[in-house]
Image (tube, grey):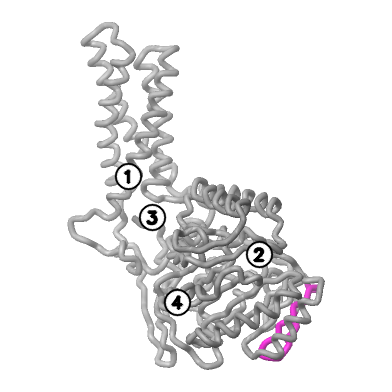
Amino acid sequence: MRTDSSPGTLPAREHLPAGDAGTPVLDVVIPVYNEEKDLQPCVLRLHEHLTRTFPYAFRITIADNASTDTTPQVAARLGAEIAEVTHFRLEQKGRGRALRTVWSVSDAPVLAYMDVDLSTDLNALLPLVAPLISGHSDLAIGSRLVRSSRVVRGPKREFISRAYNLILRGSLQARFSDAQCGFKAIRREVAQVLLPLVEDTGWFFDTEMLVLAERAGLRIHEVPVDWVDDPDSTVHIVQTATDDLKGVWRVGRALATGSLPLDRLTRPFGDDPRDREIEDVPKGLARQLVGFCVVGGLSTLFYLALYSLFRQFSGSQIANAPALLVSAVANTAANRRLTFGVRGRGGAVRHQAQGLVVFGVGLALTSGSLAALNAATSDPAHSTELAVLIAANLAATVLRFLLFRAWVFPDRDDSAQEPAVVAAHHPSSPAYSTVVPRQPGPYGASLPQRPTAPQHGTTYDTTNYGTTTRFRAGEAADGTWRDATMQPQPVRPHDTDPGDAR
């Protein structure tokens, strides 16, 4: 069940055309920091592999994260010698910052990155980007933790990797298997809308991007990889793990409070097969039943614990009312978020008020059951009281679900509330563009912004096909000013890019 009012800011996925000869379909970014020894062998090997196996035009972009050795000179030489190689120079460190910078200005419809050590076998590159080219998926990741992967690494790194992904599954309900593998790809139109929501500029950048994409309902494709650990890796495990845990807490808190406008990442209504109307099958009923049963079971345990606590100081009727009230408020909040997928604070007060009406029905059932029990026997055993309350709560639970589904959190009539979506086809372009009226989502009209004061003293070098261009931090190649980290802004579907040949 959709709970947002936005028809989606992303166009429907389509198979990407081959494009013009001068426009690459794939842009592979290699973020580096002081990699003067490994950079040239990596680029030459990657270029040879793409030339031999990749059927589309491609580009290799070296993103230098403020290296202090001869890495910039090596990158510039490679850019001058190989037509498909470009070079970005950043004066600030951070893998996430480098990827955001390059991905934000790239004109390629598919954006990828890999680590300079090439620990991942390159035979997985085409399977990685193929689902994005075909329009099947939005993001793709290499995974070292699926069964068909072949991995060579020490027990220490194996334990850390599995423990980290277990933390993600337990805390952020992540369903992807490997967040840290340096082998990922994303469609450009997805990156333009997703990257402004990602705050991290370091190693947690990957995880944050994947969690937000998954929560927004985007499709993430996983590719099993052959991976050999690099014993000379410069990653500081302790510091990275600490930063990752801080990131997990920050993202988890943002998701819990509904402060992220994930509705802006939705596809047009009808793109998801779950949007289709199927006769005699209530939409989302199976998932809602499972969620409601889980929440109901936990709420019942919480209610019984409160009742047993209050019963020590008062009679059964007095103990029952506050126990049921507290558990009902918690039950409504949990069902609102987990069962019916309503995020954010909009309508929360109204939902709680309606939940209190439902609470009144439950109170009448349980209080009536206790009154009937006290009428039957003057001093019922505590276990008998609990058994009667459980039976009454089961009846109240069924009624509560029906009222929640039909009254408190009803399915919207999307056909009546969605703005018109117009698909336009231009003969000069093989792609269709989707035009939708811009409406503020439930989280407000603007994305959360970081400080945007440009750092005019910082410069970037770009080497493209043997030509070097210098521009200052915050200044894009077209002369416009942006944030120092090259933070992109969300692109509406009807915005056009004259340089995009798709």
* Local SS, label 2: loop
Would residue 284 appear left or right of 229 to someone viewing this image? left
Q: In this figure, which residue is indicated by the disc labeled 4?
A: 130
Q: Earlier in the sequence, mark 3 or mark 1?
A: 3
Residue 352, image x, y percentages = 40, 39
* Local SS, label 3: loop
**Residue lying at 53% horizontally and 56% vertically, measured from the top left:** 260
User: Within 10 angstroms of label 2, few (less than 14), some, or many (20 or more) residues?
Assistant: few
Q: Is residue 461 magenta?
A: yes
Q: Earlier in the sequence, mark 3 or mark 4?
A: 3
Q: Which amino acid is tagged 4?
A: Ala
Would residue 234 appear left or right of 46 to someone viewing this image? right
Mark 3 or 4, which is nearer the eye?
Answer: 4
Mark 2 or 4, which is nearer the eye?
Answer: 2
Q: Label 1 near label 4: C-beta < 8 Å?
A: no
Q: Quadrant of residue 182?
A: bottom right
Q: What is the magenta segment's predominant secondary structure?
A: strand
User: Within 10 angstroms of label 3, few (less than 14), some, or many (20 or more) residues?
Assistant: some
User: Within 10 angstroms of label 4, few (less than 14), some, or many (20 or more) residues?
Assistant: some
Which stretch appears magenta?
Answer: 456-471
Mark 4 or 1, which is nearer the eye?
Answer: 4
* Local SS, label 4: helix
Q: Earlier in the sequence, mark 4 or mark 1?
A: 4
Q: In this figure, which residue is indicated by the disc labeled 3?
A: 3
Q: Label 4 near label 3: C-beta < 8 Å?
A: no
Q: Label 2 near label 1: C-beta < 8 Å?
A: no
Q: Earlier in the sequence, mark 2 or mark 4?
A: 4
Q: In this figure, which residue is indicated by the disc labeled 1?
A: 290
Q: Which amino acid is tagged 2?
A: Asp
- Which label sits on residue 108? none
* Local SS, label 1: helix
Q: In this figure, which residue is indicated by the disc labeled 2?
A: 230
